[in-house]
Image: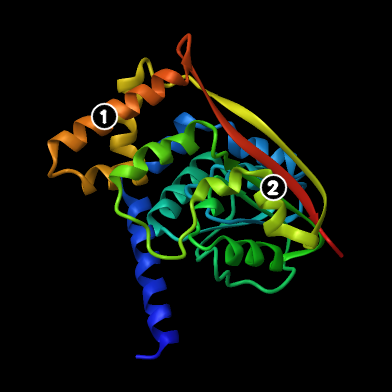
């Protein structure tokens, strides 16, 4: 087997693991009940209008794609995990939204250069393992003058710290896989997008989370619903001491970020125009 074919096989194996991880639990409940405000916010900030051709990368169950369709855009929602898209189809039908759902890898999008007026991702593309490749694809399919819009969790915010808290309990990532919260650093995203964009607007904001009565409520919800958390607990499932330590670490993290029953999760909101 050549080096190139070995690399291709390794990538297929990695993507299969990612696909399976996001199919664990119930991520649509996270999107719909924990962070429902983020998708509509991104659509608004991207200025989505009637007739726009919109691509939502790593769309999950359509937290941003469905609001874009309801705004009158011609939307394609893509994700690596077909199970999430199936839920999205159902949710779109309930809400009367018409859009296209397509299984696709954020690092190898099956679209022509400049095909979309708006290319966006709401806490999705950040989980593609190879950031430069994903960013290049996002830019490639956006037309000159079109809009790129991103919402990503920051490294210093709650979700960034959640991943840092789980890291000691998780198997080491394969070589070359980059941490998702890097996409929440303005400087890092500027580097990824480079001279391909102009009119960059970036700001850190927080989304209030009121679903959880106490830290154990948060922990149990994420253990049941959030694929990355489920995967980490499975990795240590045979070691009761590690499970207990991870429980305690997540409870402490949640308590630190809860004030009067409200958690504030920080994200980076960034929009830009594809340079002509």
Asked if residue 271 shows in the view, the reply is: yes
Q: In the rendered image of this protein, does residue 252 appear above or below residue 117?
A: above
Q: Which mark is residue 134?
A: none
Q: In the rendered image of this protein, does residue 56 appear above or below residue 39?
A: below
Is 142 placed left or right of 108 in the picture?
A: right
Which residue is drawn at the image coordinates 67% and 58% (left, top)? 192
Q: What element carries label 2?
A: helix
Is 104 placed left or right of 170 in the picture?
A: right
Closer mark to the observer between disc 2 and disc 1: 2
Q: Position of residue 55 (x, y in %)?
A: 64, 57
Residue that carries the numbered disc 1 in the rendered image: 247
Which residue is drawn at the image coordinates 42% and 79% (left, top)? 8
Q: Position of residue 212 (x, y in %)?
A: 39, 20
Asked if residue 65 shows in the view, the reply is: no
Q: In the displayed image of the protein, which residue is found farthest to the top? A: 260
Q: Where is residue 29 in the image (x, y as percent from the top left)?
A: 40, 36
Which residue is drawn at the image coordinates 46% and 65% (left, top)? 176
Using the numbered discs, state the Cα–Cα distance from disc 2 to disc 1 in whole angstroms.
Answer: 33 Å
Q: In the rendered image of this protein, does residue 4 appear above or below residue 39?
A: below
Quadrant containing the N terminus in the rendered view: bottom left
Residue that carries the numbered disc 2 in the rendered image: 187
Residue 133 falls in image quadrant: bottom right
User: Which callout, 2 or 1, points at the residue further toward the start of the chain?
Assistant: 2
Which residue is drawn at the image coordinates 20% and 37% (left, top)? 242
Q: In the rendered image of this protein, does residue 216 appear above or below residue 132?
A: above
């Amino acid at each position: 087997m050549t080096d190139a074919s070995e690399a291709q096989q390794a990538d297929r194996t990695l993507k299969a693991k990612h696909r399976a991880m996001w199919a664990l639990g119930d991520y649509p409940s996270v999107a719909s009940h924990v962070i429902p405000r983020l998708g509509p916010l991104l659509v608004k900030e991207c200025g989505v209008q009637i007739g726009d051709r919109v691509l939502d990368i790593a769309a999950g169950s359509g937290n941003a794609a469905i609001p874009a369709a309801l705004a009158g855009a011609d939307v394609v929602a893509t994700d690596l995990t077909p199970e999430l898209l199936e839920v999205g189809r159902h949710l779109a039908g309930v809400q009367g939204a018409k859009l296209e759902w397509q299984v696709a890898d954020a690092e190898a999008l099956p679209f022509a250069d400049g095909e979309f007026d708006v290319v966006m991702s709401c806490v999705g593309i950040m989980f593609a393992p190879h950031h430069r490749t994903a960013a290049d694809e996002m830019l490639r399919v956006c037309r000159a003058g079109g809009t790129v819009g991103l919402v990503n969790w920051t490294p210093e915010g709650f979700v960034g710290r959640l991943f840092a808290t789980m890291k000691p309990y998780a198997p080491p990532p394969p070589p070359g896989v980059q941490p998702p919260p890097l996409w929440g650093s303005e400087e890092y995203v500027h580097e990824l997008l480079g001279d391909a964009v102009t009119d960059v607007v970036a700001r850190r904001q927080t989304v209030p989370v009121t679903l959880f009565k106490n830290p154990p409520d948060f922990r149990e919800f994420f253990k049941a619903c959030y694929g990355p958390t489920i995967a980490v607990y499975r990795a240590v499932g045979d070691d009761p001491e590690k499970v207990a330590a991870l429980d305690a670490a997540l409870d402490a993290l949640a308590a630190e970020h809860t004030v009067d029953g409200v958690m504030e999760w920080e994200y980076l909101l960034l929009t830009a125009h594809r340079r002509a």
